[in-house]
Image (cartoon, coloured by chain):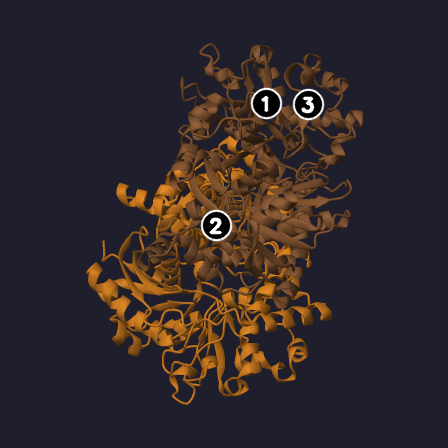
Chain colours: A orange, B brown
């Protein structure tokens, strides 16, 4: 028996990057290293010049990504005590759509002192939301022209995606637009840094840039209709060459090998979206199983053999999650964020004191109190729209609601109602999939929430009437990336030849699962009908009180 | 110039009684004494035996009322340093409908050891709410029979009123019903104790017991339709002799004079509802002016020359507030309670710490933060139904709602939204009056809230577009009672011959008033339309989500 072989997964999150070294044979996670970005999310002022940013902006500094590579990779090699030659491949996952303008050497425009003070030269993070006007313009133009791609995305393009962000640069900083050699997803920029080769992954191209395997990008005519200067955006500022997920982009360059301590030439996999790499890490390599990545927000992913139009999906992309399948994606934009907001803003001092005296967290105290309740007992019902609604309504202007309050309403009642609301939101998504022919027979959950929130998981099982399995790994994204790294290496180099094989060997679910209680499910079935009534009343009307209030809020804030 | 003359007002509240000695000449409040009831609100178990009470019950101990008389009256005489002979009259106001069963000596049934362990032998406090089935039965029967009295009360009898409470005794404790010599309002029981004479005041009879000056009580046939045993309830358990407001019930008995230190024989005025005595104390003795008593809940009172049917009024009663006028009353069941609930359940530790460091109350901190906002700036809108809706919907099954929440919503946003919601609720009531021909040209406010909440009062002015004047006295109810005591004494005994004269001399408003800002009023006009949309959507449908949730809550709680 030769030396053990390892693969490296690097998960670029919103605030930090995490490298995990994984045993190719069994998926065991040998070592982890995390690097927090020095500049984090840049949403108030540019770190270089102090130039202030308008409301809704969210930028990042690509230097933080490079430093992440140069610190976390040597750290995991050192911690694991393995030899560099034992590491056969690298996989990358990243937040998306997170993009940046680069020059013809691949250098970010914001590294150039000439452009460093222009916010449009920096990385636009996924949650940069100042692009709603551009998204509205794209949606309106696509509707008027009857563009067929719109249906693939549930009828609406999000302000978070690729073309709204690039169009904002053209509108507000035409000099940056003109100077940029290309605009590229940060995920693909990392593989460019590692290999020297530009390669755009099918996943972000499909989910965020309206690309599809059969027809490519939207037509030049469409882009011209948005703005005559935008007609040739794909050919001038992007690339039509798209790599399937799991493809080998190239070998690690000597320069990057020296900086990271890895061996030059090892396989680098085509990058991918963070949530999407979790699918094979959740053992899911076939249709009919929903993978839910539950954290600050939740992503729902399903594989299917055929394209289907489902209301409010973030999109479906052929080969977008696994080769040979259509990957369907939906999302809830406020899940863990919801509970964090509640803990920060709504928990009284008496509860803080009780938690402190008992030496437990406020989260745990609330869970303990709330878990004593039966479904319906609080009398509360909430709409989980504190951060708008991604699926199925795709409407950032919707806001949160809580109903049923009395003078006896206690913090744990509201806490439970918020959890139930997110579970109802998940059920809306499942029903939208199923009623449009995308079967969901099983659910596998991963992410931060399922690890630590028993009551929440039981409520999800009870509300949806489905069993929730749990991914074995607590670092499913990094594991998934490492799996793709092993596939890029191939069996000849000590990896695997396809993702099914990698999933069989490297991925797993826990023995324990959450099973629905029939009695609770029966009550929740009835409460869900009330949720649906509120959902449709407030969510499906352009005259919704929520939208009027948002208009007033904006006017009052000037 | 002879000795100064004084009148004594005694205000029986929910948790305590307050005696105030007032200078008859100018209304100056010379001395105050407060007694907190030892048994307060009895809502969990009987204090004597520990017998547990079902959900929704609220009782009181009449001994607390007697001790209040015997402690507060001597205290104010002592504090004021006046001679007993200088005190010319006594007026009483009380919460309503608060009633008790008595024997033929006027002794409460609960004082009899034989009955002390039966909850139905005790005082049923105004907020005893376990009588909703009886109220539903009365409303349904009255509707089916086309009883005209229903319209006087906005189409619905409240569970808090006289006959639902007495009918509950008949239903659940027929032995108590049979044994009771009479059922009597606590207000009238106090004047019975003071004078030895039974006298039932027109105000509670009219507002709480469906009596009207012209036609008296509902017919025996109606009561028979409710329950054959209830046919003669008025003649068997009440009295048809009703005193107008301000009438002299009799002179103080020698026994009570000895217990209180007052002179025997001084005038005792017919008792009255707490909110209603505030009207003349607010200088209001003519039509077109609304008096708002703003505290834990709010009462709205208006005088009119003609009877009018207004949706959701608590009722109108001829001579019910002032002789010669129809007294219109409406109410909001959750105002100060709302803010107290919020402070107790929803204010985070960081705010508590900030308030403590700065040496201010949390209320004040929230007011300070919230008052920096413009109307509409929070993006929030609430329905102020944490305790149901009294006017104009008369529906205890409605519950509170808050809408427009985002991850940026802060405690001060919610606090302000709750205040705005109660102001919108007031505006609904004003509009209901005005659209039914009851003019409201001015508003005078009194109670605990206007004294201490500048932002709240300004919001009320801005939302309603009306000037809010403030009653000069911080103890308007007790002052009003003292004014009625002076009127009962009459000018011959050193008082006044009518309430107009008493109001001219003894009552006043402050120099300062709250005037609406035209700009804010304009924004609130638009927000009010959204409030109205929510109000009607959730409040006017029997299929309202709120009612369904309440049903589930009750089922879950068994």
- Disc assigned to residue B261: none
A520 or B160: nearer the eye?
Answer: B160
Disc 2 target residue: A291
Disc 3 target residue: B241
Disc 1 target residue: B184
In the image, is residue A221 above or below residue A7?
Answer: below
Q: Quadrant of residue B368?
A: bottom left
In the image, is residue A33 above or below residue B383?
Answer: below
In the image, is residue A187 above or below residue B458?
Answer: below
Q: Quadrant of residue A146?
A: bottom right
Disc 2: CA contacts within 10 A as few (<14), some (14-19) or many (>=20): many
A476 or B233: nearer the eye?
Answer: B233
Disc 1: CA contacts within 10 A as few (<14), some (14-19) or many (>=20): many
Precedes in sequence: disc 1 or disc 3? 1
The verdict on a common chain for dots 3 and 2 is: no
Q: Quadrant of residue A117?
A: bottom left
Left or right of A293 on screen, residue A23: left
User: Dot 2 falls on which chain?
Assistant: A
Left or right of A405 on screen, residue A272: left
User: Dot 3 falls on which chain?
Assistant: B
Nearest to the eye among marks 1 and 2: give it: 1
Where residue A202 sits in the image (x, y, percent)? 51, 66
Where residue B488 sits in the image (x, y, percent)? 60, 34
């Amino acid at each position: 028996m030769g030396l053990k072989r390892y693969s490296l997964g690097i998960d670029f999150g919103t605030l930090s990057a995490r490298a995990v070294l994984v045993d190719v044979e069994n998926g065991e996670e040998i070592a982890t290293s995390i690097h927090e970005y020095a500049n984090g999310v840049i949403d108030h002022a540019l770190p270089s010049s102090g130039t202030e940013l308008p409301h809704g902006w969210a930028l990042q500094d690509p230097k933080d990504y490079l430093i992440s590579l140069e610190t976390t990779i040597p750290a995991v090699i050192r911690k694991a005590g393995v030899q560099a030659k034992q590491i056969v491949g690298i996989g990358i996952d990243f937040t998306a759509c997170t993009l940046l303008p680069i020059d013809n050497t691949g250098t970010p425009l914001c590294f150039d002192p000439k452009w460093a003070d222009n916010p449009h030269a920096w990385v636009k993070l996924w949650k940069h939301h100042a692009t709603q006007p551009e998204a509205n313009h794209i949606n309106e133009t696509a509707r008027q022209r009857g563009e067929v791609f719109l249906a693939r995305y549930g009828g609406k393009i999000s302000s978070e995606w690729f073309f709204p962000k690039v169009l904002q640069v053209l509108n507000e900083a035409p000099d940056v637009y003109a100077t940029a050699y290309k605009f590229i997803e940060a995920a693909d920029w990392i593989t460019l840094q590692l290999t020297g080769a530009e390669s755009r992954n099918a996943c972000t191209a499909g989910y965020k840039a309206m690309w599809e395997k059969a027809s490519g990008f939207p037509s030049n005519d469409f882009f011209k209709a948005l703005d005559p200067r935008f007609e040739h955006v794909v050919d001038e500022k992007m690339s039509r060459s798209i790599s399937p997920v799991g493809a080998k982009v190239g070998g690690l360059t000597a320069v990057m090998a020296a900086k990271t301590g890895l061996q030059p030439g090892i396989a680098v996999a085509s990058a991918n979206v963070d949530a999407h790499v979790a699918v094979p890490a959740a053992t899911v390599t076939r249709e009919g199983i929903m993978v839910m990545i539950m954290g600050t927000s939740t992503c729902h992913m399903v594989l299917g053999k055929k394209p289907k139009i489902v209301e409010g999906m973030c999109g479906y992309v052929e080969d977008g999650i696994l080769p040979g399948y259509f990957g369907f994606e939906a999302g809830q934009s406020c899940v863990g964020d919801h509970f964090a907001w509640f803990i920060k803003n709504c928990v009284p001092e008496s509860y803080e004191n009780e938690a402190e005296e008992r030496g437990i967290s406020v989260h745990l105290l609330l869970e303990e109190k709330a878990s004593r309740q039966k479904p319906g007992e609080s009398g509360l019902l909430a709409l989980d729209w504190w951060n708008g609604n991604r699926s199925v309504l795709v409407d950032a202007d919707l806001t949160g609601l809580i109903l049923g309050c009395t003078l006896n309403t206690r913090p744990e009642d509201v806490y439970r109602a918020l959890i139930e609301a997110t579970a109802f939101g998940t059920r809306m998504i499942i029903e939208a999939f199923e009623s449009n022919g995308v079967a969901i027979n099983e659910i596998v959950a991963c992410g931060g929430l399922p690890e630590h929130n028993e009551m929440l998981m039981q409520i999800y099982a009870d509300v949806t009437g489905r069993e929730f399995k749990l991914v074995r790994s607590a670092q499913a994204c990094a594991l998934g990336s490492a799996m793709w790294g092993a596939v890029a290496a191939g069996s000849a180099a000590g990896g695997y030849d396809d993702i099914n094989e990698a999933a069989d060997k490297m991925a797993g679910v826990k023995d324990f699962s959450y099973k629905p209680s029939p009695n609770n499910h029966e009550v929740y079935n009835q409460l869900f009908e009330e949720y649906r009534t509120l959902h449709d009343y407030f969510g499906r009307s352009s005259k919704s009180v929520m939208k009027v209030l948002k208009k007033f809020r904006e006017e009052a804030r000037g």
